[in-house]
Every structure is written in structure tokens, then in C-alpha cells.
Image (cartoon, rainbow, N blue to C red):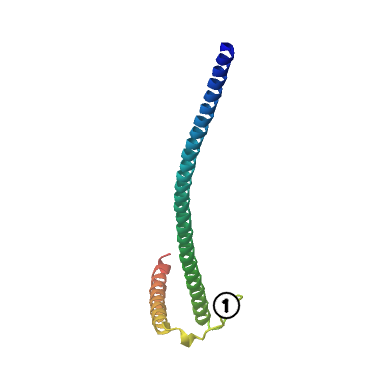
Amino acid sequence: MTQYLLIAIVVVGLLGGWIGYEAGHKAGSAEIQIKWDADKTAIQKAADVALAAVTAQKEKALADNEAIQATYQSQLQSAQTTAGDLARRLRDYQNAAHGGPMPPPTGGSGPVTSASIPSEGRLDSALAARLAECAGNEAQLSALIAEIKPQL
């Protein structure tokens, strides 16, 4: 009987140990799971904050890029308009200076008469002054040639 009692005590001891082990294991597992869930929540919050910051930076960069592109396009359009206006004015001046219209380039404006050039009076007076100077130089040159020719 003592053998049975000893076996019963060993079985009860083993069974009690096993039940204690299982209870501790479940409690430990639950505690680990709670800590793991808390870590996952903290990691997710940090990732959400970082993602929001990166998204905000990206949106700001895209907005800045659009503003730069708009400024560039505006400047480009202004330069093209200025270049077109300069080309038209040069064609108009050339037409007026040569006394007749030249064929406009494709997409250009039509000829402009010489009366529409605002600085025509100044150009005429400057041209007259240069022509008078040339005539005076020609007279001096002719006199010099006449003086040197007999000496040769």
C-alpha cells in the first residue's frame, strides 16, 4: 500500500506540476502577447508619423515644382513674345528703310509704312549728316589727288 501511496503522491505531484506549468505558461504567453501588441501599436504609430511627414514633404516639393514650372513657362512666353516683337519691328524697319515691303515670314505681321516708324526724322537727319560728311571727304580727296597727280 505504501507503494500505491507513493505512486499516487508522485502522480499527484507530476499532475500538479504539469498543471502549474501550464498555468504559468499561459500567463507568460498572455503577458508576452500583450507586450508584443503594445510594441506593434507603438511601431505602427511611429511609421504613420514618418509616412505623414514624408507625404507632406513630397506634396510640398510637388507644389514648389509646379510653381517653378509656372514661373519658367511665364518667362519663356515673355521671352518668345519679346523676340517676336523685336523680329517684327526689325522687319518693319527694314521694309521702311528699303522703301517697300518685303514678304513677311510665315505667321508674321504684314508690312508697315514708313510713316509709322517713330524715329524716321532722326534717321533722316543722321543720314543727311553722314552723306554731307562723305561729300566733303570726297571733295578733299579729289583735291589731294589733283595736287599729287602732277608730281608723279
In this image, 51 relative to 129: left or right? right
**Looking at the image, which is closer to me, 74 or 133?**
74
- Kindly give the residue lying farthest to the front in the view shown: 1
Q: Position of residue 71 (x, y in %)?
A: 45, 65
- 47 or 110: nearer the viewer: 47
Residue 36 drawn at (x, y percent) = 49, 39
Q: Position of residue 62 (x, y in %)?
A: 49, 59
- Which quarter of the image is occupied by the N terminus? top right
Q: Is residue 51 above or below residue 119?
A: above
Q: Nearer the viewer, residue 54 or 126?
A: 54
* Residue 54 against residue 101 in the figure, above or below: above
Residue occupying image coordinates x 57% and y 20%:
11
* Residue 80: percent from left, percent from top: 51, 70
What is the count of numbered marks?
1
Q: Residues within 10 Å of mark 1 (few under 14, many from 20)?
A: few
- Say which quadrant the C terminus sits in: bottom left
Which residue matches tag 1? 108
Quarter-of-image position of residue 102 = bottom right
Give, as a three-letter code, the residue at label 1.
Gly
Depth check, front residue: 51 or 147? 51
Q: Which secondary structure lies at badge 1?
A: loop
Horizontally, residue 53 falls left or right of residue 10, namely left
